[in-house]
Amino acid sequence: MSERALLEVEGLHKTYSMSGRPKTHALNDVALSVPEGSVTGLVGESGSGKSTLIRCVMGFERPDSGTIRFDGTDMVGASRADWATFRREVQMVFQDPYSSLDPRMTVESLVGEGLRLQQPGLSRAKRRALVVEALESVGLAEEHLPRRSASFSGGQRQRIAIARAIVMRPRLLICDEPVSALDVSVQAQVVNLLKQMQRQFGLSMLFVAHDLAVVRHLCDTVAVLEHGNLVESGPTRDVFASPQAEYTRELIAASPVPDPVVQRARMAARPAV
């Protein structure tokens, strides 16, 4: 893992305004970095600002102020050429594979769409070969190419979504709660697949989640958001072993553990509310 940051966010502010209502401060002076070859976790409850941060990083929304640097280039106000590079080198896996995959498209079209748009010079045979390679890397096969996503389970659909991202050979993969919409029985399979992909391709990854057990298993570093404020960040092992912020301690205390005896003891020790 390199110490060089591939993605750097500094001083990010984002507010929303609605007629007749006070401004909502979604992000307040947020700073975050993703070192090359590492996995950074971003955690917090619903409404903490995780999705807003991701939308700003991806260019779906423009922050009020602050910088978002990818490989040293500030993407706030970046040129078309810079954004074209960003779109090739940054891919995203969304939360819900049922809505993120067009049910009218075949698996071959879904996984190969980015190649068709970003590398129009590829022959159809070469593009198909790359799609098959990506599918096989996530545990699917060439025989799945003509099928449509509606014929697959949720876990299989998320594998297709991962293949769609991986086929572009990105440098940074952004995962927005990629297992929260899946059955518990397949969540671990998808998380382990992402870990395998990260190691195999040397990916940097920003992993957004509310499941702290997943973050602890997958991430090298973690950042904690509360109501748009970054309250804690650092190596995952250190944050979990000795959380400094009260909010982080509450998140860890509320996170279930696999040992029922430990979980009952933890719940009994929590103060009554």
Image (cartoon, rainbow, N blue to C red):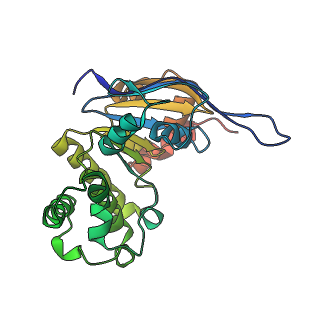
Q: Position of residue 204 (x, y in %)?
A: 29, 36
Q: Position of residue 91 (x, y in %)?
A: 35, 47
Left or right side of 153 for 243: right
Instruction: Tell me the quarter of the picture where residue 121 sits.
Output: bottom left
Instruction: Tell me the quarter of the picture where residue 218 sits.
Output: top left
Q: Residue at x 70, y 39 (%)?
A: 273
Q: Nearer the viewer, residue 127 or 267?
A: 127
Instruction: Tell me the quarter of the picture where residue 202 sits.
Output: top left
Q: Residue at x 50, y 39 (%)?
A: 266
Looking at the rendered image, the quarter that the N terminus falls into is: top left
Q: Position of residue 74 (x, y in %)?
A: 43, 26
- Compared with 193, 247 (above or below) is above
Q: Nearer the viewer, residue 71 or 43?
A: 71
- Compared with 170, 249 (above or below) is above
Residue 197 appears in view: yes
Q: Which residue, as the protein is rendered here, is positioned at the far right?
A: 20
Q: Position of residue 96 (x, y in %)?
A: 46, 60
Left or right side of 268 for 68: left
How many marks the image carries: the answer is: 0
Q: Nearer the viewer, residue 6 or 113?
A: 113
Residue 189 appears in view: no
Q: Residue at x 16, y 45 (%)?
A: 200
